[in-house]
Image: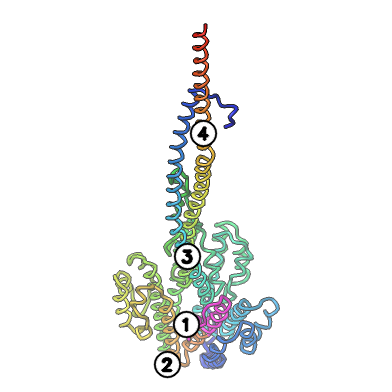
Amino acid sequence: MPIFGGRSNYPYICARVKAKKSFLLSKDAYHRMLSMDLAEIGRYLGETQYREEMAALGTRYDGATLIENGISQNLAKTYTDILSFSGGHLRQLIAEYLHRWDIYNVKTLIRGKATKASIDDIKEILIPAGSLKQEFINQMLQTTTTEELLETLRQQSVVYVDEELLRNALQTGKLAVMEDALDKEYYSSLLKSIRKTTISEERFLDFMRKEIDITNLKVLFKLKSEGMSGEAMTQYFIPGGLEFKSDRLTKLAISEGMKEMMDDIRQSSYGDYIHVDIEEFEDTKDISSLLREMDKALLDLADKFSHLYPLSILPVLDYVLRKKTEVENIRIIARGKESGLDPELIKKLLVL
Amino acid sequence: MPRIEIQPTRSELQETNRRIHLTTNGHRILKLKRDGLIMEFFKILDEAKDIREDIVRKYQESSERIAIADAVDGVLAVRSAALAISRKPKIELLTRNLMGVVVPEIEATTIRTPPEDRGYGIIGTSPHIDLAADSYQRLLETVVKAAELETTMRRLLEEIERTKRRVNALEFKVLPDLLETKKFIEMRLEEMERDNIFRLKRIKAKAKEA
């Protein structure tokens, strides 16, 4: 990752982020959108902070696609804005956090190349966020052989890709191991970049480790519902969690029933967020509500941390997460309406 | 059989009797086969009906799951995950014999894959995408099973139809023709017998007169 110079202008950034936060949609806005049709939602968004994107894309797209593209572009712009007005170590931390979009885009590029998808198809699904240069993306798109792909990846320093894993993935057509290594590397690099010189940075480290806990729990729920064996599961956990370290996660993974696992999780600080009926869950193996509860837990944590240290990266992080959740909620409403999902189900999917 | 070609002889009568016996046996066996095929067909029909309902249910479930994945993770993320899947499902087409009818037996071994074999990463891919992928894999498995059952049903129907035509042909055409032929030969033979007796009587009478 590039090292950013200058001072970490916390008061300025936090004030700007606070101002931006005031533009986030309220819970009422989602309820209003739920009773609108797609055209009305588009018009409504055109009167909010999404005005520019909706106007710019209005001639090319319509319906849910217009809404999804508009809000995605706005999200990317918001992240770029935050980076542009921050400086010093703070900027480095924010950039490290937003680095997940680079990972997503590199994964998409490799997936596209591995399956020989057309350049247009790959281009269409890249997310315009993160710090990958357009030149690198174009070079990646033009590669035709594994060697060219490896060479192009070697020339950039934004995302580290293990060559052996990539070579193996391209040979076998199974990208999972390489992709998981990228995700683990993301968290490892993020944890390393936190200096722990101030209390706020220590709390930021705690927050990130809690995020790792939540990600690991989501992986655990997913793999448990798929019926994967406990031993096999352990390789998918990201090291560095705060409450759920490797041995505790292994214990949960090899536990026989869901009840035993949930009882243990309920004893942690995330226990308050889990309200699912275990018997119903054991029957249906539907983890959707559990996942939403985990997402809500993360949002709540970000909110709590941001209030504890108002002049730190934590309010920025809280805003970044809230903005991402807002975009996801709008997309859930728009796509849900487009696919004719039951309004009650759409409401359930929202993270409010 | 046109009567003009029939030679009203004892050997022809024996041959016709042999053919009647063969036809009656064939007719009985074909009727048994037809009934057996119909029973088999109805057995599969129930299974096929269940599997059709299963397909509709699973299709609705898969559509809902992909709609949820599109909504929660975005169409871009879903399409990106789809790009990672390079392994296409393989099916092996075998055959089996069902009462003389060759029906397909489709073995699909690589449709349902565990999450680690789907191509994309476990950690970074949303569980909603996994749920959608799993639903579609289950749907595809059912579609393959339905294809096997429905092809079997179609082949059975064709065979039932063919057997029915044969049974009807034997019952309403071949057997009546043969019986008629037998009757004709018997009548002709009796007539010839009578002619013969009459001729012998006349010869005997002439011999007496002489």
Residue A137 on image: x %, y %: 60, 68
- Identify the main secondary structure in magenta: helix
Please identify, in this view, whether the residue under mark 3 or under mark 1 is nearer the observer. 3
The secondary structure type at the circle numbered 1 is helix
Sequence-first tag of 4 and 3: 3
Residue B114 against residue A285 in the figure, above or below: above
Q: Which residues are magenta?
A: A323-352
Please identify, in this view, whether the residue under mark 4 or under mark 1 is nearer the observer. 4
At label 1, the amino acid type is Lys
The residue that mark 3 highlights is B53
Please identify, in this view, whether the residue under mark 3 or under mark 2 is nearer the observer. 3
The secondary structure type at the circle numbered 4 is helix
The residue that mark 4 highlights is B178
Of residue A53 and residue A14, the one placed in the foreground of this image is A53
Left or right: where B91 falls relative to A155: left
The residue that mark 1 highlights is A348
Respond whether the residues carrying marks 3 and 2 are from the same subunit.
no
The residue that mark 2 highlights is A308
